Amino acid sequence: MKTTITLLNKTYQFNNVKELLAKANEEKSGDQLAGIQAKDAEERLAARHLLAELTLSDIREHPVIPPEEDEVSRLIDEAVDEKVYQIIRNWSLAELREYLLSSQVTGKEIDWIRNGLTSEMIAAVTKIMSNMDLIQAAGKIAVETHCRHTIGQKGVLAGRAQPNHPTDDLNGIKASMYEALSYGVGDAVIGVNPVDDTPDNIKKILTMIKEEIEKWKIPTQNCVLGHVTTQMRAITEGAPADLMFQSLAGTEAANEAFGIRIDLLDEANELIHKAGTAKGPNRWYFETGQGSELSSSAHHGVDQVTLEARCYGLARKYKPFIVNTVVGFIGPEYLYDSKQVIRAALEDHFMGKMHGLPMGVDVCYTNHMKADQNDMENLALLLGTAGVNFLIGVPMADDCMLNYQSTSYHDIASVREILGLRPAPDFESWLEQMGIMNNGRLTEMAGDPSLFYTV
């Protein structure tokens, strides 16, 4: 395996695949904070040249975290389809990139090839792709999932309604939920981040949302984004939950900082399929985001893009209904400005789709980051062209509980209108019955939540 290259009469030496992956990465403040970034643009270019020449077997045979030291590494390696891997193992990363971008290669062919890839191979090819490459390749891949109804079809952009409230007041949550529905948002899930992470509170919120879903016959799912153990207790006590939620990280140590291990997720998976209120096969909602492993000092010297890919390798074990990266939520320590946020979102979306995941994005930033709402609107449109499964909507793009900036309900409606996208089919039919949408376009009634107070 070649680890030395000379460019413009200067020789660059890299110690191992882990270092090569880190230094080939686009500039990220998180990698700088970890002290693993390229020294300059020239070293980054040299790392990419070498990385492009590595074979897929080089990547697999030199894992960034050995399987004997990490359960996520073991899970990812054991999931490889050996028959597919043996066919492609001698491909270089440059050849993999060309294959993914070829006009003759379809999404179904990508579906087949990904079974022979590890998460680190997917992260590696991401590093030698431009933003447009990531959009083009991801746009070929459609991932359909079914919980209480189906999302992910080509031409569909779903939305998560996020009606958070700073005191978990049920009437406040309900008012925000009605506003989301009035803009045609909520087909991915009506999901609340609770202030009070207790079984009683989670049960209370889940019950209210479920009652509204049944009252209005809404084809959607409910979820309260508490810790998985709290949700498990609530469900055991009779809470009506369609989806189980959990945040994931890309290393065993970082997941332990989240209070989870694979055996706990296995137990929760069994519970939601036994006692959950949905009938479809896909009953998980996972969230990820570049930088979480570094924030818990559990990154093992691995760059944040590679670690993010490993999150998706873990997530696909459970065949989730939806997954999203909360791309700019952690802050400028990990993604400094809008350029880094946009790049990270396109990377995450591509890598998630390459894992066969129903990938969405929380297009977001914190107020101390060098970004603004125009940047987020640009990113939302880019993701729409890339075929993102869903975006997240909060009132006026300002989450009053989590205190960060995201996309609004009407932003999602605008992305659909601009790009000719539609809500999930069952949800669109319901919107038409409610008079909110007609032939794929919002009516004059849209944006007026008072229609839900007339009965």
Image (tube, grey):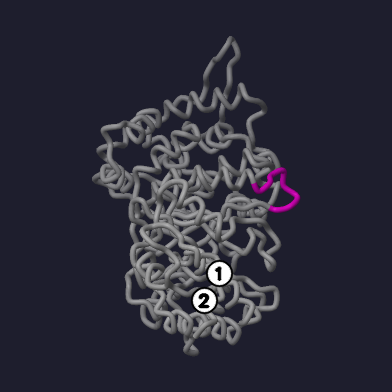
Q: Where is residue 430 in the image (x, y as percent from the top left)?
A: 38, 71
**Residue type at the position of mark 2:** Leu
Q: Mark 2 points at which residue?
A: 451
Q: Is residue 91 visible?
A: no
Q: Position of residue 302 (x, y in %)?
A: 57, 44
Predominant SS along the magenta part? loop
How much space separates mark 1 and mark 2, taking CA atoms? 7 Å
**Left or right position of 288 against 395:** left
Magenta span of residues: 366-373
Q: In which quarter of the image is residue 35?
A: top right
Classify mark 2: helix, strand or loop. Answer: helix
Location of the N terminus by quadrant is top left
Residue 109 on the magenta segment: no
Q: Which amino acid does label 1 sit on?
A: Asp
Whether residues under marks 1 and 2 lie with C-beta atoms below 8 angstroms apart, the answer is yes
Does the magenta portion include 369? yes
- Residue 448: give its label: 1
Vertical placement of residue 52 versus 201, above or below: above
